[in-house]
Amino acid sequence: MSVRDMVEKDYYAALGVPKDASAADIKKAYRRLALELHPDKNPGDPKAEARFKEVSEAYDVLSDESRRREYDEARALFAAGGVPGGQAGGYGFQPGGFGPGGPGYHGGSTAFNLDDLLGGAGAGTAPGGLGGLFDNLFQRSPGGRGPRRGADITAEVTISFEKALSGLEATVRLPGAATCLTCGGNGARPGTTPRTCTTCRGLGVVSRSQGGFALSEPCRDCLGKGTVIDSPCPDCRGSGRREREQRIRIPPGVADGQRLRVRGRGSPGERGGQAGDLEVTVHVLAHPVFDREGQNLTIVLPVTFVEAALGASVKVPTIDGAPLTVKIPPGTSSGRRLRVRSRGVPRSGGGHGDLIVTVDVTVPKPTDLSAKARTALQEFAHAHPEDPRTTLMEQMEGRS
Ligand SMILES: [Zn+2]
Ligand SMILES: [Zn+2]
């Protein structure tokens, strides 16, 4: 946190509370604002996100008694005219320079340490020296450091083959549950509070005497929690925890196993730090007819051996509409790949990959052959006495 931030950031104004607000008021104000501004409730709203960070940062400081005291004192110090702004060496941090109207740190009653102040802003120091000084001040309070980037979150989503081609808005379940913002995690409907269990008087256990012994067992009325929720929070049904979800946009053409990184949609940063990223691994379900090779869509197309020998125009299904007609050239072997341009997977840079049609010459089962067809095949064999293995034999003879 820079000196400038320190002077300019009004955490009380950020939370909309007076300077003498009680800890309870600060908490209440934060909870209300956090609920209103939470990124889950304002997806894609940078203003709300910025405000949410501002409010979180303000609450971080003001909710911590010692940090709040340091912040108050630092601001009082500036307000008292200690620092006119960025001239090097002109900070006015001299012993006794704060006068009777100052925050009184001479008395030693505050967290300030004169040596720290002078050490940081020593002779001819650059303006940055003071920034470091205040960073140090904040570092001295437990848990208080500079801005910290939020953690990255990993998640997975499974989508259909077709949606992977067209792209979609998907809801991604994030691992682990988060505190319910509606009730602040206590599980009670807003405006109500969990009450102490009357059966066990909040102990969670009840004693029962049996045969002269006192036995303790978990209270059945509160299930050992010690509190009872009469009116559960509608959003978490009393659990105080909620599954987290994020809506993300999955671009057209995403591949199975691909990882999408969504900047700033991970865990929120702390003390003004930027949020982490959300990394989503996409699983694409298999399709019964189509498959993919990178940006190409593939299909295996059965043809008869007559179509393969004589050539034919045959219909091929498409993933997104009416079938298209593909020409099988005369003399096509099984396994031949025919290419239909631009009917494949959308490319990230625009355009599409190709549709690759692999010809699969089918052979009729003997049980499917009529007597007439069988005779026709025999006639064909007589008319075309070809031995396709001749070349193989010749190649082998040449080697011996
Ligand atoms: Zn709740
Ligand atoms: Zn109880």
Image: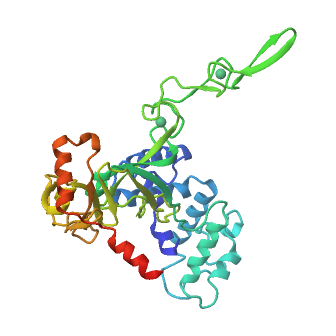
Q: Residue 235, how many percent across, how many down?
A: 43, 35
181 sits to left or right of 67: left
The residue most toward the top is 211
Residue 346 occupies quadrant: bottom left
Question: Image quarter for residue 330?
Answer: bottom left
What is the residue that sits farthest to the bottom in this orientation?
Answer: 124
Nearest the camera: 190 or 90? 190
Examine the rendered structure and indicate whether residue 121 appears above or below residue 81. below
In the visual, does 320 lie left or right of 348? Answer: left
Work out whether residue 98 can be spotted: no
In this orientation, does residue 204 appear?
A: yes
Image-based side of 231 in relation to 167, left or right: right
In this rendered view, identify the residue nearer to me: 186 or 351.
351
Rendering coords of residue 162 (x, y %): 28, 52
* Residue under the image location 65 percent in, 77 percent down: 117
Q: Residue furthest front?
A: 382
- Residue nearest the observer in this picture, 341 or 346: 341
The spot of residue 296 in percent (x, y) is 29, 65
The one nearer the camera, 298 or 184, is: 298
Image-quarter location of ligand 2: top right
Residue under the image location 47 percent in, 56 percent down: 12
Vertical placement of 307 versus 41: above or below? below
Query: What residue sits 13% from the left and 52% below the top?
Result: 322
Q: How many marks?
A: 0
* Relative image position of residue 138 (x, y in whole percent): 61, 67
Instruction: Please tell me which residue is depicted at 34% across the width and 66% down the height of the picture.
Output: 294
Identify the colour scheme used: rainbow
Give left or right: position of 338 versus 190: left
